[in-house]
Amino acid sequence: MIYIFSYCLSLFFSFYTDITSRNLGKFFLFIAILFPVLLFGLRDVSIGTDTALYVYPTFELATQSDSWKSFSNIVSDSTNIEFLYVVWNFVVSRITHDYSIFLIFTGFLLYIPFVYSLYRHKEKLVLWFALFILYFVFFRESLNALRQYMAMSFCMLAFSYLIDNSYKKSLLFSIIAYGFHHSALIFLLIIGLWILCSFRSAKISSLKIKFILTSLFFAMLSFLANIVSALENIGAIDSRYEERYLTSELYGTNIPISLFALCILNLIIYKQISKFSQSSLKVFFEYILILSLLCCFLGTISTFLVRIGSYFQICTIFIFPIMYKEYIGYYDIKILRFHLAFLIAYWILTVVIANLGQTYPYKSLILGI
């Protein structure tokens, strides 16, 4: 299958990024991201449920517009698409009218922040495993929820600076992320959690903080409609969030079992490998994994709302590679092997069997598939 073939080639080159010289390593890393970018860019419009909904139509509007004013007016009148995504479409449409080239450019914009954020910490993490998680858990959804994943890529750049205590850069990239998708406001909770962990008193036990976080989460869940309404009133989000994220008419009230199982397994594995870690980040990481599990319960309100948890779940591309950096070489790696096997099984379940997001089988007229 072309997905597995592309993933394996990318992982092969990313592995050599760690064991070669700095300049050669950068070259191998660039080659590594070419494969997912081309896979992202050469697909048909039928791949990804949101592709035909707004990705293709928005770019077509941009190519047909004579000026920024006419394009922005049409988009603002007919859709609620965020400003930076509109700008991106217009800028690329001035370079090319080819939809596939637009997707390739967009693929680079999407994956370079992800990869650069990891590369900044390559001495602290297992880079190939970070990309393994990115491909087998999140790549499928990036073909579907494009604007949100563009936002999440900049959130991960913000995350990489956050764990360096570089608050200004973290906030800057968070603002950029918000410009691509307003759901990036959720990342402010991660910044707040980092501040809490950084300045918490030693007298406050980790168990108490877990209890407080869980209580606050369910309190926010109870008042979610009020929170969304307040954000809408101040203009932080638009009306579609209230229409789509607070109703279950289309999708039913359910907790997505596959995601729930993934989050539970992540917590179990984390508890095992973190026993051997001396990292100052491990408490912060554990809180993120707990919140990502709790976010599965958002499915009781709306399937769309579960996407909010993606901002916590995507942090696993940092969490486990950092933890395994200490774990591998000193302890039995059976846990790592099991983790890899489970992630592959998760991909098969969600992509091959369930075809979530309408991304399987892969189709491309350009590639003749």
Image (cartoon, rainbow, N blue to C red):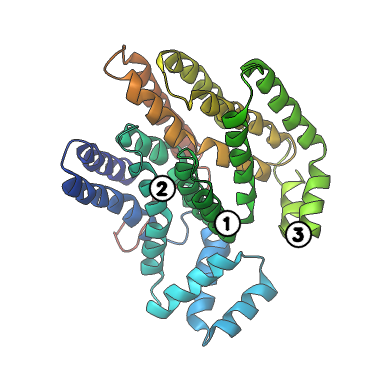
Residue name at image x 23 percent, y 49 percent: 26
Is disc 2 in contact with disc 3, using a CB cutoff of under 8 Å? no
Nearer the N terminus, badge 2 or badge 3?
Answer: 2
Task: For marks 1 and 2, give the CA distance.
Answer: 16 Å
Name which residue type carries label 1.
Ile
Give the residue type at disc 2: Phe
* Residue situated in front as seen by the camera: 317 or 211: 211
- Amino acid carrying label 3: it is Ser
Residues packed near mark 1 inside 10 Å, few (<14), some (14 to 19) or many (20 plus): many
Question: Which residue has dot 2 on it?
Answer: 114
Residue in the image at 82% along x and 39% along y: 223
Q: Is residue 12 left or right of residue 315?
A: left
Choose between 263 and 170: the one closer to the eye: 170
Residue located beneath label 1 in the image: 175
Q: In front of the other: label 2 or label 3?
A: 2
- Which residue sits at x=59%, y=56%? 178
Residue 358 appears in the rendering: no
- SS of the residue under disc 2: helix
* Label 2, label 3: how far apart the Cα atoms are: 29 Å
Task: Report which quarter residue 239 is drawn in.
Answer: bottom right
Q: Earlier in the sequence, mark 1 or mark 2?
A: 2
Q: According to the image, label 3 marks what residue?
A: 239
Note whether residue 322 is visible: yes
Instruction: Check the image and report above or below for 363 versus 320.
Output: below
Above or below, comparing residue 84 to residue 313 in the picture: below
Answer left or right for 27 relative to 251: left
Among numbered discs 3 and 1, the one appearing first in the sequence: 1
